[in-house]
């Protein structure tokens, strides 16, 4: 997992509430077991028409959001099924941070396990960010060590569990956490097998 410290880049606005995991990554694309290759299918039914052509009015197809690394959305982002593939698709597409008033619990937890930072800043601050960014191409800075979201004319702090913060800062998923103890695990196995 890639470490997450400070992220600076374009923020795309998704003015939709209750964005569910079936829209983030539709079920027909859940045939892979690798964590890569899902970005091309992110929001597929919203991004593409039935012939597979990009829908020019969809948020992530707008030229001003090209290369976006931050997604700003409305309430209850990531609701629906528990598919971890939704986070895999966001990360593979290049989205490393999602900012919203709140998140569905399972999606929120899956983000941390896959190097994507979910930031819940409440409705008022989210609306303030929407209003400020408007229909422009704006870069935003997410400072995980300082727990702040910054752009010209906007600042918000956010809470994060210290353990999850540590894992993101050091790029540690569950396997990475276990591998920190590799020498002790190997010593145990050697003692067990001798």
Image (tube, grey):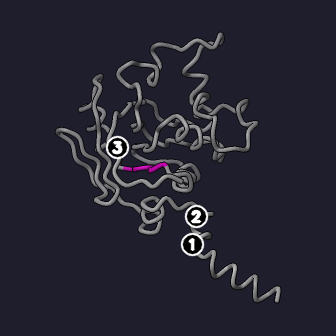
Residue 176, image x, y percentages: 58, 64
Give the magenta-colored segment's residue range.
Answer: 116-120
- The first of marks 1 and 3 along the sequence is 3
Q: Secondary structure at mark 2?
A: helix
Q: Quadrant of residue 74?
A: top left
The x, y position of residue 172, in whole percent, is 53, 62
The residue that label 2 is drawn on is 176
Residue 192, horizontal then vertical, whole percent: 79, 87
Q: Are dots 1 and 3 in contact, CB under 8 Å?
A: no
Q: What residue lies at 49% left-to-right and 58% top-to-bottom?
A: 171
Q: Secondary structure at mark 1?
A: loop
Between the residue at mark 2 and the residue at mark 1, the CA separation in whole angstroms equals 7 Å
- The alpha-carbon separation of the residues under discs 2 and 3 comes to 34 Å
Picture quarter containing residue 26? top right
Looking at the rendered image, the disc whose residue lies closer to the viewer, 1 or 3, is 1
Q: Which residue is mark 1?
A: 180
User: How many labels sit on residues?
Assistant: 3
Compared with 72, 57 (above or below) is above
Q: Is residue 76 on the magenta stretch? A: no
The percent position of residue 105, horizontal first and vertical second, equals 55, 53
SS for tag 3? Answer: helix
Task: Point out the tag, 2 or 3, that comes first from the N-terminus.
Answer: 3
| Nearer to us: label 2 or label 3 | 2
- Seen at 54% across and 42% down, the residue is 78
Q: Residues within 10 Å of mark 1 (few under 14, many from 20)?
A: few
Tell whether 142 sits left or right of 155.
right
Q: Nearer the viewer, residue 190 or 132?
A: 190
Q: Nearer the viewer, residue 35 or 84?
A: 35
Q: Residue at x 45, y 49 (%)?
A: 118
The residue to which callout 3 is attached is 123
Residue 29 versus residue 158: which sits nearer the camera? 29
């Amino acid at each position: 997992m890639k470490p997450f410290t400070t992220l600076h880049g374009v923020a795309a606005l998704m003015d939709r509430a209750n964005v569910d995991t079936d829209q983030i990554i539709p079920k027909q694309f859940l045939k892979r077991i690798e964590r890569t290759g899902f970005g091309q299918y992110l929001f597929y039914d919203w991004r593409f028409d039935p012939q597979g052509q990009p829908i020019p009015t969809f948020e992530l197809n707008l030229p001003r959001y090209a290369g976006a690394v931050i997604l700003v959305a409305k309430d209850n982002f990531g609701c629906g099924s528990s598919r971890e593939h939704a986070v895999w698709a966001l990360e593979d597409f290049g989205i490393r941070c999602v900012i919203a008033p709140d998140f569905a619990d399972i999606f929120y937890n899956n983000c941390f396990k896959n190097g994507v930072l979910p930031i819940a800043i409440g409705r008022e601050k989210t609306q303030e960010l929407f209003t400020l960014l408007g229909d422009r191409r704006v870069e935003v800075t997410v400072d995980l060590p300082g727990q702040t979201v910054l752009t010209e004319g906007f600042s918000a702090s956010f809470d994060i569990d210290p353990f999850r913060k540590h894992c993101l800062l050091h790029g540690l998923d569950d396997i990475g956490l276990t591998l920190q103890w590799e020498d002790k695990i190997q010593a145990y196995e050697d003692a067990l097998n001798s």
